[in-house]
Image (spheres, rainbow, N blue to C red):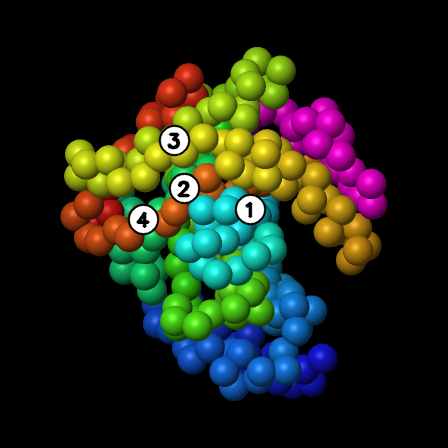
């Protein structure tokens, strides 16, 4: 484990990079002995300082849950981060690129819980039973650590590279639709760039919710009612620049549109 003062210093570096929309050198290049536990400790210090400053936690993101994303990043296990209220946009939004160090878009489903969910033996059926509704979402990735050569330790430390999310306006209960076959057709400036279906996320997009509940149990925590769980991308990330119009067609779950300004 890294020493507590090193963990605090790295969390402070990431907080400053978030404030200035910049990137820092890879943590694993400077601390090759750093572990996954260290990375969650760094993320935890950063999270707690944001909460102390008045930001409100609204949910969790799960990342690296599909083969497409694992192959795109070279990372082979899921991770998670936190989402604050000031990072939530809705379809039709104009999103300032200056809020981020870099901007990539992923296609996902998000789930809102109607009751708490905890491990250690949480199953997909348990997760579906605890979900109030699913809603289509785009995740805005935002890395504060140099991209080349990143490992999962770097990514987790950086709040799993979460920047923001854009939510659609169609809500579906899990018993209203086969969530595995929700499509995503992602376009930039009218040109289709990525396509996929939600089954690409661990076979069922809600599987990650159960995984996260079990992971939280290891830390004596649980997922709470009302939390939004961003379940992981079923396409590769798409780079976005200022002036780009982004559209994603989720078939029976509607369309999300946004513009980067």
Circle 2 sits on which residue? 235
Q: Quadrant of residue 8?
A: bottom right
Q: Which tag, 3 or 2, sits closer to the chain's start? A: 3
Q: Are marks 3 and 1 in contact (CB under 8 Å)?
A: no
Task: Answer few, some or many: residues within 10 Å of disc 4's Cα (few below 14, many 20 plus, some between 14 and 19).
Answer: some
User: Can residue 229 be found in the magenta stretch?
Assistant: no
Q: Is residue 170 left or right of residue 130?
A: left
Task: Answer few, some or many: residues within 10 Å of disc 3's Cα (few below 14, many 20 plus, some between 14 and 19).
Answer: many
Q: Are marks 4 and 2 in contact (CB under 8 Å)?
A: yes
Q: Which tag, 1 or 2, sits closer to the chain's start? A: 1
x, y percentage for residue 123?
76, 34
x, y percentage for residue 176?
57, 13
Task: Answer few, some or many: residues within 10 Å of disc 2's Cα (few below 14, many 20 plus, some between 14 and 19).
Answer: many
Name the outermost residue toward the top: 176
Q: Could you give the CA–CA distance between mark 3 and mark 2, rounded to whole angstroms?
A: 8 Å
User: Can residue 124 be found in the magenta stretch?
Assistant: yes
**Magenta residues?**
113-134
Q: Which tag, 3 or 1, sits closer to the chain's start? A: 1
x, y percentage for residue 170?
44, 21
Circle 1 sits on which residue? 65
Q: Which tag, 4 or 1, sits closer to the chain's start? A: 1
Q: Are marks 3 and 2 in contact (CB under 8 Å)?
A: yes
Residue closest to the eye, 183 or 112:
183
- The numbered dot on residue 184 is 3
Circle 4 sits on which residue? 238
Q: Could you give the CA–CA distance between mark 3 and mark 1, rounded to whole angstroms?
A: 16 Å
Can I make out residue 226 in this image? no
């Amino acid at each position: 484990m890294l020493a507590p003062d090193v963990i605090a210093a790295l969390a402070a570096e990431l907080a400053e990079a978030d404030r200035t929309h910049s990137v820092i050198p890879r943590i694993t290049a400077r601390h090759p002995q750093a572990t996954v536990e260290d990375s969650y400790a760094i993320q935890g210090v950063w999270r707690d300082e944001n909460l102390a400053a008045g930001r409100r936690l609204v949910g969790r993101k799960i990342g690296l849950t599909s083969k497409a994303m694992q192959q795109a990043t070279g990372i082979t296990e899921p991770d998670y981060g936190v989402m604050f209220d000031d990072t939530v946009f809705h379809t039709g939004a104009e999103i300032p690129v200056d809020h981020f160090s870099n901007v990539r878009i992923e296609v996902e489903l998000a789930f809102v819980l109607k009751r708490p969910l905890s491990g250690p033996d949480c199953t997909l059926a348990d997760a579906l039973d605890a979900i109030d509704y699913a809603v289509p979402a785009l995740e805005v990735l935002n890395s504060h650590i140099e991209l080349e050569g990143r490992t999962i330790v770097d990514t987790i430390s950086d709040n799993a590279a979460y920047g923001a999310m854009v939510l659609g306006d169609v809500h579906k209960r899990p018993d209203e639709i086969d969530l595995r076959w929700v499509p995503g057709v992602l376009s930039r400036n009218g040109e289709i760039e990525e396509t996929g279906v939600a089954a690409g996320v661990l076979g069922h997009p809600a599987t990650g919710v159960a995984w996260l509940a079990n992971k939280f149990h290891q830390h004596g925590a649980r997922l709470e009612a009302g939390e939004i769980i961003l379940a992981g991308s079923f396409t590769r990330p798409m780079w976005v620049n200022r002036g780009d119009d982004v559209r994603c067609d989720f078939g029976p779950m509607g369309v999300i549109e946004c513009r980067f300004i």
